[in-house]
């Protein structure tokens, strides 16, 4: 490890480690479970964890999320839950 490693570099290293341990798959497979309601605390905590993995625009994690969403058959279940989780005003297009 580099002694003068910045906080951002440490964060990216941790994000990439969790990504290599299949955290993205575990998060979104659970979020895509039809039995998990968007109002559940577990759902909200998983969303927060996913946001943390993507914080700073981590490209490795973004690629994993994209790959999962384009190949995981239950990903549409997750997208059906998003409007119930996010306030409607956040989903309106920008003008």
Image (cartoon, helix red, strand yellow):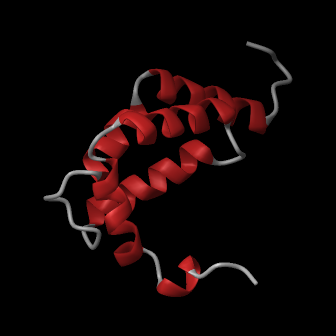
Q: Is residue 22 above or below residue 66?
A: above
In this picture, residue 56 sits left or right of residue 31: right
In this picture, residue 29 sits left or right of residue 21: left
- Please identify the quadrant where the N terminus is shown: top right
Determine which quarter of the picture holds residue 14. Answer: top right
x and y, in percent, of residue 85 in the image: 38, 73
In this picture, residue 79 sits left or right of residue 60: left
Q: Residue at x 80, y 15 (%)?
A: 2
- What is the count of numbered marks? 0
Q: Residue at x 40, y 68 (%)?
A: 82
Q: Is residue 5 above or below residue 61?
A: above
Q: Residue at x 52, y 39 (%)?
A: 66
- Please identify the quadrant where the C terminus is shown: bottom right
x and y, in percent, of residue 32 in the image: 27, 51
Front residue of 38/69: it is 69
Q: Is residue 66 above or below residue 95?
A: above
x and y, in percent, of residue 48 in the image: 47, 57
Q: Residue at x 70, y 30 (%)?
A: 10
Front residue of 82/39: it is 82
Residue situated furthest top in the rendering: 1
In this picture, residue 20 sits left or right of residue 34: right
x and y, in percent, of residue 93 in the image: 64, 78
């Amino acid at each position: 490890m580099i002694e003068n490693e910045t906080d951002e570099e440490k964060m990216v290293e941790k994000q990439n480690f969790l990504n290599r341990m299949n955290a993205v798959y575990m998060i979104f497979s659970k979020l895509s479970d039809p039995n998990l309601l968007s109002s559940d605390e577990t759902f909200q905590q998983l969303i927060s964890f996913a946001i943390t993995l993507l914080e700073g625009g981590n490209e490795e994690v973004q690629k994993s999320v994209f790959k999962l969403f384009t190949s995981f058959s239950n990903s549409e279940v997750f997208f059906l839950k998003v409007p119930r989780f996010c306030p409607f005003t956040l989903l309106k297009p920008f003008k």
